[in-house]
Image (cartoon, rainbow, N blue to C red):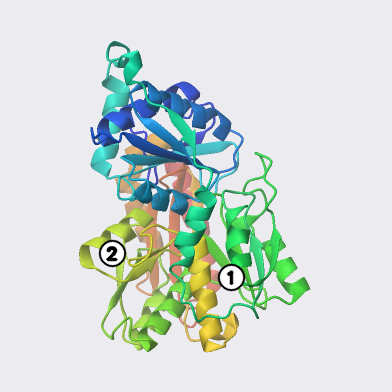
């Protein structure tokens, strides 16, 4: 049985493996696999604002201390802050307690190595093996070998200063009117502080977490409140983060959200103009990114590498091939010369910097990209039935689509019991009514199979 999905461990609170007992045991297993056996023996632990963080933070702390690790508590802070702090504190590894954009009833764990990067699949499997098979009861350390825990009081300041070091000093943000939606999540304190220090005219919403309102009709998945506030204030941009602030959705001055592809295109075009990117350079995205985006990049001389869904795969390509940056339509963006982890606020500030330097509105910056129409089908499945019928189901779905002018991707969700089918088409050559007919057939076929 696997505990890890595409982005750490995630599930319902108080259901295996997201119980206090299991999480304590997981922290012990992680210490054995990821600990350096050095004299430092230090782990940084962060969390978002979910009520269940009060279960899992002490459970992890207890588990780590019991196997001789010192614990540095830094939350609640964004996931990218943990990556930075883990490196600066020279930790053996770090753990983030979050379920990202999911509602408060869910929680999860993300593990990072000593370099602040997500751990490998091999390391995940080793942790799982120990969790299920290791006899922790008969491998206890002596009382004088126990670790201890401290809470880092200046964690917000450390992250804030590190993030601002990446910003060009000559940029004037003072004229920008900004709406910030922190999703009542991990960035509720630090994001307004950073933007205030940059000098923007700021209105912050959804920044009063109570443990259960994280991602609740707000943030990157629900930008309506931010759009309403933006139009009311006649603002230049709205920044909508998710619960752990590793992803972002940006809204232009007309109240229209930008896709991840549009953000990547704006960055690519600007870096090309500044010769940070050269013609023929490659950026990275995933296999479901818009094919119109790829066509637009080709026109300005930029190549596109597609990898499997998951920011871990984007990062792997950037590190192995030395590409400058990449990202996903969902709002995760990774920069080689930055933190090497998705950071919603960093991405937003980069776009604001381009707006300021080029003296252009966000709606003008997004004009040159072509985007195909996208239909995303998320159908609930029984996982066991899906695994039994997967091969036949995929063949049937391909027969239903059967059009060279329709780009498609079929994949099971890594975090939920869903089968995702992504269809893309140029509406100049494919009728929307044809796509709707295909959608009905796809849903019926999946329902019958699993």
Residue 94: quadrant of the picture: top left
Q: Residue at 35% of width from left, 29% of height from top?
A: 69
Quickly name the residue at label 1.
198
Q: Residue at 30% of width from left, 50% of height from top?
A: 115
> Nearer the observer, disc 1 or disc 2?
1
Q: Are marks 1 and 2 in contact (CB under 8 Å)?
A: no
Mark 1, secondary structure of its residue? helix
Identity of the residue furthest to the right in this view? 232
Q: Residue at 31% of width from left, 33% of height from top?
A: 41
Can residue 361 be spotted in the picture?
yes
Residue 149: quadrant of the picture: top left
How many dots with numbers? 2
Q: Is residue 212 left or right of residue 117?
A: right
Residue nearer the viewer, 387 or 136: 136
Residue nearer the viewer, 373 or 258: 258
Return the disc, 1 or 2, that comes first in the chain's sequence: 1
Residue 435 location (% of width, % of height): 50, 67
Mark 2, secondary structure of its residue? helix
Residue nearer the viewer, 66 or 297: 66
Q: Residues within 10 Å of mark 1 (few under 14, many from 20)?
A: some
The numbered dot on residue 318 is 2
Residue nearer the viewer, 145 or 122: 145
Residue 311: quadrant of the picture: bottom left
Residue 381 location (% of width, % of height): 46, 41
In space, the residues marked 1 and 2 are separated at their CA atoms by 29 Å
Of the 4 image quadrants, the one containing the N terminus is top left
Q: Is residue 179 left or right of residue 154?
A: right
């Amino acid at each position: 049985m696997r505990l890890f999905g595409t982005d750490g461990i995630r599930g319902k609170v108080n259901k295996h493996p997201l119980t206090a007992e299991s999480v304590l045991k997981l922290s012990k297993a992680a210490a054995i696999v990821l600990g350096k056996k050095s004299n430092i023996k230090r782990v940084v632990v962060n969390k978002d604002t979910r009520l269940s963080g009060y279960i899992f933070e002490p459970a992890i702390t207890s588990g780590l201390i019991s196997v001789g690790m010192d614990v540095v508590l830094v939350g609640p802070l964004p996931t990218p802050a943990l990556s930075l702090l883990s490196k600066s504190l020279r930790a053996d590894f770090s753990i983030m307690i979050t379920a990202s954009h999911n509602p408060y009833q869910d929680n999860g764990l993300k593990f990072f190595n000593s370099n602040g990067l997500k751990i490998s699949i091999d390391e995940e499997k080793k942790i799982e093996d120990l969790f299920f098979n290791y006899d922790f009861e008969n491998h206890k350390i002596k009382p004088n070998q126990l670790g201890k825990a401290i809470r880092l009081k200046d964690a917000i300041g450390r992250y804030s200063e590190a993030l601002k070091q990446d910003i060009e000093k000559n940029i004037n943000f003072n004229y920008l009117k900004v709406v910030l939606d922190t999703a009542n999540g991990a960035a509720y304190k630090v994001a307004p502080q950073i933007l205030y220090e940059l000098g923007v005219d700021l209105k912050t919403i959804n920044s009063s977490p109570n443990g259960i309102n994280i991602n609740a009709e707000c943030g990157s998945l629900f930008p309506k409140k931010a759009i309403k506030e933006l139009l009311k204030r006649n603002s230049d941009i709205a920044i909508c983060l998710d619960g752990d602030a590793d992803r972002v959705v940006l809204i232009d001055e007309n109240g229209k959200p930008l896709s991840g592809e549009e953000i990547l295109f704006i960055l690519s075009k600007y870096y090309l103009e500044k010769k940070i990117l050269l013609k023929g350079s490659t950026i990275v995205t995933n296999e479901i990114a818009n094919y119109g985006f790829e066509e637009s990049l080709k026109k300005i001389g930029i190549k596109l590498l597609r990898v499997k869904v998951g920011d871990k795969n984007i990062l792997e390509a950037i590190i192995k091939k030395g590409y400058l940056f990449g990202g996903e339509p969902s709002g995760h963006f990774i920069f080689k010369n930055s933190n090497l982890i998705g950071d919603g606020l960093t991405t937003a500030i980069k776009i604001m910097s381009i707006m300021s330097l080029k003296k252009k509105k966000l709606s003008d910056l997004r004009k040159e990209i072509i985007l195909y129409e996208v239909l995303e089908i998320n159908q609930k499945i029984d996982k066991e039935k899906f695994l039994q019928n997967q091969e036949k189901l995929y063949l049937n779905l391909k027969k239903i689509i059967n059009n060279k002018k329709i780009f498609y991707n079929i994949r099971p969700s890594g975090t939920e019991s869903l089968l995702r089918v992504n269809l893309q088409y140029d509406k100049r050559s494919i009728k929307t009514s044809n796509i709707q007919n295909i959608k009905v057939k796809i849903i019926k076929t999946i329902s019958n199979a699993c």
